[in-house]
């Protein structure tokens, strides 16, 4: 299957990449165990399908995801657009992590990431979360200095508000913004995506299939105790039955279009992004080649208007917030998600 390419950002900090990227958090065991050999085989499968955009972060498995990617990229680094993130320090459990974006920390962590990845530069380096104790201008300024130093080609922000994106972009050009966006998670459409469209910034949706919820393989009865999703409101016992019922409706629409549900979820994103005037490169993650092929089937599909309207109406019916702490994501800080 041929995968088209696209451009994120504008001007001298444009990034040419595939229209679909691979999000490598799954390689660190967040959704279940995976061996290094299986990870390498999966990455090879993804690469064979013309995916050139690989996304990771220093926090994924305390560097394990970066280390595995580094092993895969050995002797073929030039074939890929490589992104990583900095700005989260691990704490005592989910919700206890700390956002950290001071200049000293950013400049320290880039060298650790480059070492694990086995490269001398990143194509895209994000601030993973905005640090409430550090002005966004300081964080973006430090990222910009890494571009000047040749360690980074372009910079991005993750889960930043529209106002934070505007302030950061005034300090140094932002090439891409990464946040959760899917049929079920729509808060970024209020402020974040209009800001990206206005400033010519690309958008990278993570969790485009709702952490596996928007797939044909999701089983609400089979989430293992160690699965990270147990900590997210959508998957909690008081919300999951209603959300599983909504999923059934999405599956029916996908079946009517002869698409896998995951493929439909991606097709919806591309079509919605085009309507909003934003260039996107989603980064779904998976541990299996079969699931990847289901995802990729949605890249160049046109969904009929009636089906789009049905899917558009679902977000308002979803039970629970998309984050365990609304203050941890852009929509929560913009007042679009309830604060617990």
Image (tube, helix red, strand yellow):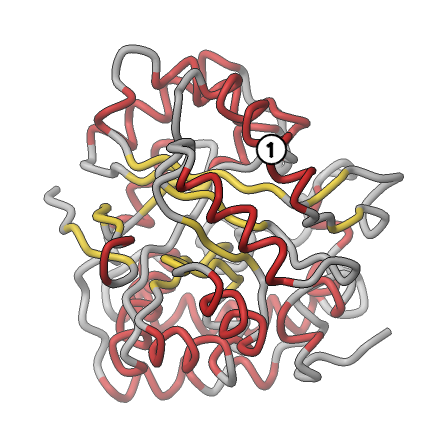
Q: Quadrant of the C terminus?
A: bottom right
Q: Is residue 29 left or right of residue 301?
A: right
Residue 274 in percent (x, y) is at 25, 76
Q: Residue furthest left?
A: 2
* 94 or 201, nearer to the observer: 201
**Residue at 45% in and 42% down:** 23
Location of residue 71 in the rendering, given as x and y in whole percent from the top left corner:
42, 13
Q: Camera-side residue: 49 or 126?
A: 126
Residue at 28% x, 58% y: name it.
8
Compared with residue 37, is residue 47 higher up or lower down, i.e. above or below?
A: below
Total marks placed: 1
Please tell me how crowded label 1 is: few (under 14), some (14-19), or many (20+) other residues with Cα within 10 Å.
many
Residue 337 image position (x, y, % from top left): 70, 79
The local secondary structure at tag 1 comes to loop
**What residue is shown at x 70% (from left), y 75% (from top)?**
333
Q: Residue 51 at what x, y percent from top left?
A: 25, 38
- Position of the N terminus, as image quadrant, is top left
Residue 163 figure quarter: bottom right
Q: Is residue 259 above or below residue 307?
A: above
Of residues 91 and 199, the one nearer the viewer is: 199
Q: Is residue 299 left or right of residue 98?
A: left
Residue position marked by numbered label 1 in the rendering: 58
Taking the image as shown, residue 125 lies to the left or right of residue 128, namely left
The residue at 30%/37% (across/down) is: 81
Closer-to-camera residue (234/82):
82
């Amino acid at each position: 299957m041929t995968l088209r390419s696209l451009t994120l950002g504008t001007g001298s900090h444009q990034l040419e990449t595939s229209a679909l990227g691979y999000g490598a958090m799954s390689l660190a065991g967040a959704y279940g165990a995976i061996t290094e050999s299986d990870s390498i085989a999966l990455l090879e499968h993804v690469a064979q399908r013309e995916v050139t955009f690989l996304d990771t972060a220093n926090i994924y498995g305390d560097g394990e995801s970066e280390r595995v990617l580094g092993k895969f990229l050995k002797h073929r680094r030039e074939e890929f657009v490589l992104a990583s993130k900095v700005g989260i320090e691990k704490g005592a459990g989910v919700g206890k992590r700390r956002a950290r974006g001071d200049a000293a920390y950013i400049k320290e962590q880039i060298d650790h990431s480059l070492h694990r990845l086995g490269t001398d530069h990143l194509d895209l380096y994000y601030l993973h979360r905005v640090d409430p104790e550090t002005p966004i201008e300081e964080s973006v300024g430090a990222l910009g200095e890494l571009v000047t130093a040749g360690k980074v080609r372009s910079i991005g922000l993750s889960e930043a508000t529209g106002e934070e994106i505007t302030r950061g972009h005034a300090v140094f050009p932002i090439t891409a913004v990464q946040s959760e966006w899917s049929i079920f998670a729509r808060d970024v459409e209020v402020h974040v995506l209009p800001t990206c469209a206005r400033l010519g910034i690309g958008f990278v949706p993570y969790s485009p299939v709702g952490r596996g919820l928007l797939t044909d393989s999701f089983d609400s009865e089979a989430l293992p105790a160690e699965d990270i999703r147990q900590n997210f409101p959508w998957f909690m016992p008081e919300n999951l039955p209603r959300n599983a019922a909504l999923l059934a409706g999405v599956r029916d629409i996908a079946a009517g279009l002869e698409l896998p549900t995951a493929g439909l979820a991606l097709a919806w994103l591309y079509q919605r992004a085009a309507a909003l005037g934003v260039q996107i490169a989603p980064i779904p993650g998976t541990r299996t080649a079969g699931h990847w092929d289901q995802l990729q089937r949605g890249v160049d599909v046109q969904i009929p208007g009636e089906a789009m309207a049905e899917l558009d109406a679902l977000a308002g019916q979803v039970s629970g917030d998309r984050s365990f702490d609304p203050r941890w994501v852009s929509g929560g800080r913009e007042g679009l998600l309830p604060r617990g």
